[in-house]
Image (cartoon, rainbow, N blue to C red):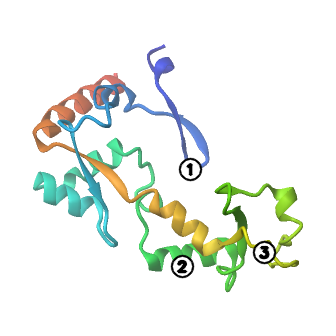
Amino acid sequence: MFFGKFDKIQYHGKTVTNITNSILLKYRPMNNTTLYTFHSLVEGETAEILAHKYYDRADDHWIILLLNNIVDPYFGWLLTSREISAMVEQKYGEGKGNLVHHLTNLTTRKRLDEVEQSKYVNREGYVILPLPAHYHPVTNHEFETEKNELKRDIKILAPRYVQDFKNQFEDIMAGVDK
């Protein structure tokens, strides 16, 4: 079976075949500085803006998304601070962004497990006992902001490889239609 060797990904809560797998294998050496430019996103920068900047074509934004394994261009991309605040309110409830999401042990730099945390923080996110000095509370808002920061650094395919990438992608898609 042709798709048997392709990776599986999660998309809208379902496991699906990553049909772009074979083209990405050629471009997988992510630290190869001849293939990529490394870019640190600034707030409000979109894949379309970057595609226009690097490739002179905003329509090629899909290449940036694909090579950075971004399936959802809205929530898979770096959110603005306003979007994070709205997402935190929607996810945790109005006014609950400053409640404790988890505790971190500053000595070990590790997150406390649920049993240990439950001694100090209740399920609603309120501190119920004074925290030891080496325990740091991480709020819902801080947690989501930290997760979002992991999306900041991305890879941009070097412009000289874009046409080759598009040609290979088109060939793969033509084979899928058969």
- In the drawing, what numbered circle is on residue 12? 1
The front one of 172 and 114 is: 114
Q: Residues within 10 Å of mark 1 (few under 14, many from 20)?
A: few
Work out whether mark 2 precedes mark 1 in sequence or the reverse, and give the earlier one: 1
Q: Could you tell me residue 20's position as x and y percent?
A: 37, 32
Residue where numbered disc 2 is placed: 85
| Residue at screen point 46% across, 57% down | 150
Question: Is label 3 in contact with label 2 (beta carbons under 8 Å)?
Answer: no
Kind of residue indicated by mark 1? His
Q: CA distance from mark 2 to mark 1?
A: 22 Å
| Residue at screen point 62% across, 78% down | 89
| Residue at screen point 67% across, 84% down | 94
Single out the mark in the foreground, 2 or 1: 2
**84 vs 2: above or below:** below
Under circle 3, the secondary element is loop
The front one of 131 and 72 is: 131
Q: Residues within 10 Å of mark 2 (few under 14, many from 20)?
A: some
* Corner quadrant of residue 132: bottom right
| Residue at screen point 40% across, 57% down | 73
Residue where numbered disc 3 is placed: 125
Under circle 1, the secondary element is loop
Work out whether mark 3 precedes mark 2 in sequence or the reverse, and give the earlier one: 2
Kind of residue indicated by mark 3? Gly
Q: Residues within 10 Å of mark 3 (few under 14, many from 20)?
A: some
Single out the mark in the foreground, 3 or 2: 3
In-image side of 1 versus 51 (left or right)? right
Q: Could you tell me residue 77's position as x and y percent?
A: 41, 59
Q: CA distance from mark 1 to mark 3?
A: 28 Å
Q: Could you tell me residue 25's position as x and y percent?
A: 34, 26
